[in-house]
């Protein structure tokens, strides 16, 4: 039996990871569709509902480039978002007292970010995380984020990431070594990238002995056809629940504090990390 650490959460946290398509450039339509999915997740008992990367404007680079006014949400100096197109999500989050994490395109002054927006239990919309690692098609449009984010819900420390962030083990490891119990990411993987997608999130879970929650976008047409893959992985990288690979659906599972403690007691990678392994010697073999 694992021993609970004082910093570990003391309860279950039920999380829903949504798979869903978006209508490119139509934030209001996508927020309205998201509200219906939050209602469905609430009926499943979810405390937190996670949506894919850029769910609100849709992950469609041609539209993101050509229609920034329709795609972007403005953020004020304090990270608050007043855009009325989010009202359906504000209303449902407040009514059900759930937290919603949803992918957005944000503009703050001259800078534009791929972001995670939190709609909290009071219905307030806040900018909480900016994607730190951008893929090639995103770099002309967006600025990379500068720092990580830990979101605390019911005592659970959730490290936030977005899609390509998960390809860098250091990103998830930074969350784990600063006390996170789970790594929560929205993503948008093209059809054909399923093996890579699933391997990333399973590996990040086992590497860091924490839960991983992934919400993947579906829909679109080639070359922007998206492969879904929403799933929740336990601290050994096993799938706890997963959504269908296409269409609309969700993975729902409890993050369990006792399971987290047991795995971390058995697999002690986090406490066994060495700081001196970067020193290397080079050995040459004569030809």
Image (cartoon, grey):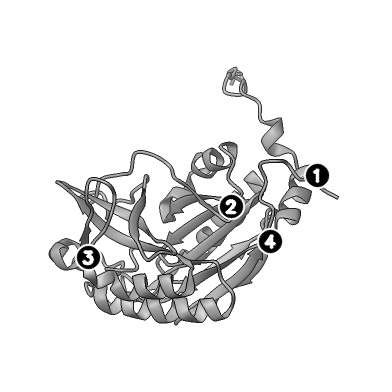
Against 72, is 219 above or below? Answer: below
Mark 1 vs 2, N-terminal side: 1
Secondary structure of residue under mark 1: loop
Against 104, is 281 above or below? Answer: above
Of circles 1 and 2, the one toward us is: 1
Secondary structure of residue under mark 4: loop
Note whether residue 126 is visible.
yes
Provide the residue designation for mark 1.
Answer: 3
Q: How many labels does the image show?
A: 4
Distance of label 1 from label 2 (alpha carbons): 18 Å
Residue at the spot 56% in from the left edge and 56% down from the top edge: 201
Residue furthest right as drawn: 1
Of circles 4 and 1, the one toward us is: 1
Mark 4 vs 3, N-terminal side: 3
Note whether residue 229 is visible.
no
Mark 3 vs 1, N-terminal side: 1
Provide the residue designation for mark 2.
Answer: 182
Residue at the spot 23% in from the left edge and 61% down from the top edge: 82
């Amino acid at each position: 039996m694992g021993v609970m650490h004082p910093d570990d959460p003391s309860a279950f946290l039920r999380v829903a990871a949504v798979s869903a398509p978006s209508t490119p450039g139509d934030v209001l339509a996508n927020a309205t569709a998201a509200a219906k999915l939050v209602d469905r997740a609430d009926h499943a008992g979810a405390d937190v509902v996670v949506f894919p990367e850029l769910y609100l404007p849709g992950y469609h680079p041609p539209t993101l480039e050509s229609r920034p006014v329709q795609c972007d949400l403005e953020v004020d100096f304090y990270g608050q978002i007043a855009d009325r197109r989010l009202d359906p999500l504000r209303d449902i989050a407040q009514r059900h007292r759930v937290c919603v994490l949803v992918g957005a395109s944000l503009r703050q002054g001259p800078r534009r970010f791929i972001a995670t927006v939190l709609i909290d239990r009071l219905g307030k919309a806040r900018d909480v995380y900016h994607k730190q690692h951008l893929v090639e098609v995103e770099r002309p449009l967006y600025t990379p984020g500068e720092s990580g984010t830990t979101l605390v819900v019911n005592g659970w420390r959730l490290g936030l990431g977005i899609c390509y962030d998960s390809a860098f083990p250091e990103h998830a490891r930074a969350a784990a070594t600063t006390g996170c119990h789970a790594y929560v990411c929205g993503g948008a993987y093209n059809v054909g990238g399923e093996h890579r997608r699933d391997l990333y999130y399973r590996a990040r879970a086992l590497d860091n002995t924490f839960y991983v929650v992934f919400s993947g976008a579906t829909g679109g047409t080639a070359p922007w056809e998206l492969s879904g893959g929403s799933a929740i992985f336990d601290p050994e990288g096993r799938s706890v629940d997963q959504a269908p690979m296409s269409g609309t659906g969700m993975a729902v599972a409890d993050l369990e504090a006792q399971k987290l403690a047991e795995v971390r007691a058995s697999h002690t990678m986090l406490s066994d990390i060495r700081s001196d392994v970067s020193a290397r010697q080079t050995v040459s073999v004569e030809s």
